[in-house]
Every structure is written in C-alpha cells, then in structure tokens.
Amino acid sequence: MARDAKLEELEKRKVWPLLVSYSLPAIVGMVATSLYNIVDAIYVGQWCGAYAIAAIALVFPAMNLTVAVGTLVGLGSAATASITLGQGKFERANRVLGHCVILSALFGVIVGWLSLPWLKEILMAFGAGGETLEPAYDFMLVIMLGFPFSSGFMNLNHLMRASGYPRKAMVSLLISMVVNVAMAPVLIYTMDWGMTGAALATVLAQLVGMVWVLEHFSRTRHVLHFQRGIFLLRGAITRRICTVGLPPCLLNIVGCVVVMFFNYRFLQYSGEMGVGAYGVVNRVLFFFAMIVLGITQGMQPIVGYNFGLGNYKRVRRTLFYAIVAASTITFVGAVGMEIFAREIVSLFARAEDENSRRLIEIATRGIRIMGICFSFVGSQIVIGNFFQAIGRPVMSIFLNLTRQLFFLIPAIWILPSLLGEAGIWLSQTTADFLAAFLGFTVLLLFLKRIFPRNNTELDQPLYDHSPIQVKS
C-alpha cells in the first residue's frame, strides 16, 4: 500500500510549519476539553453556590481515575499507531484501531458501571460529606453512567489525530464543546436540574462527539478505518498499547492521589471553601496545561512517525520547537495569573455571601503563589511526552512520577506544617521548579548519549523495530 499523503507531510514538510499545523488544531481541541471543566464550574458556581464548587473539587480525583483509563488506551493507541504507520505497517495499524475500540468499551464498562453500587462510599473516601456529598453524588452518577461513551470518544479522537487528521480531531472537540456550552445553562438553570444537569450536558456533548469520530473511521478512504477482522484482541498489540500508554495513565493516577492530599490539607487549614478555591485555581492552571498538551499532541505523530522511519534529526528539531512553544505559553499564563488573579477567580463565584467571598479571597492568594514557577511547567510536560512518543515509557514514567511522588507529596506534607495554608500552595510551586530542573538534566544527558548532534543515525537502537506478531 502506498504511503498516504497525510503521512508524506510528516516526513518531508518543514518542521516548524508542520508542528504549527498539527499543534493548532490539537490546542483548539484541548482548550475545548478544558472549557468543559471551566464552563461547568462557572455555571455551577453562579447558579448552585460555593458548596457545589467545593463538591466538584472533591470529586475531581475520582474523575481523574476515569481519565487515567482513557489515556492508557487512547494515547497508547495513538503513539503505537504513529510508529507503526512510520514503519509502513498499515494492516497492523488498523488492528490498533480495532483494539482501541474494544479496550475503550471494556474499560468504560468496568470503571464506569461496575463502581456505581459503591459510588457514595467512594466519594466519601475522597472527602465528600456534609453539604458537599449530595451535589457530588448527583454529578458523578451521571458522569460514570456515560463513561463508556466519553472514553470511546476521547480515545478514538487521539487516534484520528495520530493518523494524520488533526483538524478533524479539533472539529470533533469543538462540536462537543459547543453542545456542552449550549446545553449546560438549559439543564442546570432552565430545567433546574443543578449538578445532574451539569454532568448530563457533558455526557451528551461527548456522545455527539463520538458519533463524529465513528463516522470518520467508517470511511474506507482513510488510512485507518473500520474493517472486518480488526475487532479481535491480540496479546502483542494489547501489551504494546498498554505499555506505551502507561506513563500518562500512571501520571493521572498519581495526580488523583496528589489532589486527595491537597483536599485533605485544605480541609484541615481552610475547610470546604479552601477545597473549592483549590478547585478553581486548578481549573485555571489546567487551561494553560491543556494548551501545552495540545502542542505535545501535535508533536507526537511527527516524532513517532519519524522515529519509526529513522529520521532522527527531524525528531530532535521537533522536540526543540515544542519546548520553546510550550515554555512561552506557560510564561504568558504565569504573568496573566499574577496580574489578573482576582478577576479570574471571580468568574467562578458570586460574592453575595460569606462563603463565596471567602472562596474568592483564598483562590486569589493561591493563584498568585502557584503562578511563581508555572513558567517551568511547559517544558516539563513536553519532555515527559517526548519519551512516550519515541517508545521510551520507562523514562517518561520516571520523570512524571518523580515530580509527583518525590517532590510534590513530601512538600504537601511538610510545608503546611511550617507555613500554614500558604505552604499548601507553595508545595506545587516547589515541585514545578525541581521537576523542570530534573527533566532538562535527564533530557540533555539522553540527547548527548543517544542523539549525537552531527549524526542522523543512532549509536544504538531505541525501539524494537521488529514486526508486531499478529496471528492472521
């Protein structure tokens, strides 16, 4: 089978314009994903009150666990497909598509539906209780019921982008975002369904997006498309997808634990309004982090395809441009958070009662503290995703888990005891700086040893280029 035109540009087009063309749609798509959380939080804060904002913050770790499963399959499939397409193994790449569909459905049902009988107990374990338990349960019940559809949509969207269709992947997320933004006020305010309405708007939006991506993969003219014989799990492909997708999966699981630590500390020092304030700040930081993730998703097919092809000079150049772009984004975000802190957090709550005013005050202080080292976050995200894109999951896991387990969790445990509430916010700032320093150190040592500056060939193989063993 001849190489698809979409794949040809990954090999031959100038790197910077190529990265921009792939990243911009991914950025728009990731921003759309981020706006799910921001719009829901704004609507909930304005119409359901400060305790509802705190409830969303408390269920965030539980939602993070569902995201972890999605990244295991979605990003693992995308990276595996990119490398396989770069090697010209189109039949095997289509088998990856089939595995993505099956695994998304299996994990969606297992994680989303089988946990429902114990949902209240799970939410209480995450810190929900008193005034926050009921809104938290109303929200998560709908989210978990719709998780198989949400998981399928996001995972197939990753695969669409990896196979050379970043703009269509962007459009699918935009369609989903528009549906969410349009439906949320109707279901929350007009229908007076509150938290249930907020969750239902999100699930319906992602269901519409899933219809879009299913239609794309149904067309036989695309390099990856549904066909007979691909919907059967094979051990080798399943292991490859899960291995490559493990770093972002573990990162999200550890992120869940970290948020639980944050919530526990805020409940100790600031109460439920401190938890709500952290939820607001987290959404603002998440917005800029999602832009950076859009850059890394634009980088991933370029790096993965050229790595599979053996064009290592292009891999190195793409990495450099991605780090510069990501660092610029997080620097702009840090400056904006310092200057417009109060204006930003005031979007999420009406200062009409004491609880809301207290939430705004805590969040304003927090966003300014966490913005101090936020500039370093961009490069850190790119470096971790680079190792994943070239099939080095162990290195990616090491960098991501080091930040969370060895820098952030000890800081959350120690600094509040010394500095009070300010120490909770400073713990993430400290971890961002240390993780960025470690990431650059590891990357420079890696590039110096493996990617000699004046050579386009590797001194030693980084990836097993042997065919994936698939029984016909």
Image (cartoon, grey):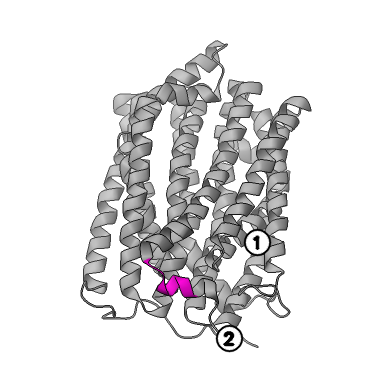
Q: Which amino acid does label 2 sit on?
A: Met
Judged left or right of residue 376, residue 100 is right
- Give the residue number, with chain letter if any, for mark 2: 1
On the image, the x and y values in percent for residue 389 come to: 43, 66
Q: Which of marks 1 and 2 is in front?
A: 2
Look at the picture and state if 200 lies above or below 5: above
Front one among 234 and 204: 204
What is the magenta segment's predominant secondary structure?
A: helix
The quarter in which the C terminus is drawn is bottom right
Q: Identify the residue shown where x is 43% and y is 30%.
A: 265
Most distant residue in the bottom direction? 472
Label 1 and label 2: CA atoms lie apart by 28 Å
Query: For mark 1, what is the residue?
Result: 104
Name, please, the residue furthest toward the right: 191
Q: Residue at x 50, y 71 (%)?
A: 82
438 displayed left or right of 365: left
Coordinates of residue 101 in the picture (x, y in percent): 67, 66
Instruction: Name the residue type under label 1.
Output: Ser
Q: Nearer the viewer, residue 408 or 85?
A: 85
* SS at badge 2: loop
Instruction: Point out residue 126 in the picture as x, y percentages from the top left corner.
Output: 56, 37
| Magenta region includes residue 10 | yes
Tell which circle, 1 or 2, labels the residue nearer the N-terminal end: 2
Q: Is residue 379 magenta?
A: no
Task: Please give the range of residues in magenta.
Answer: 8-14
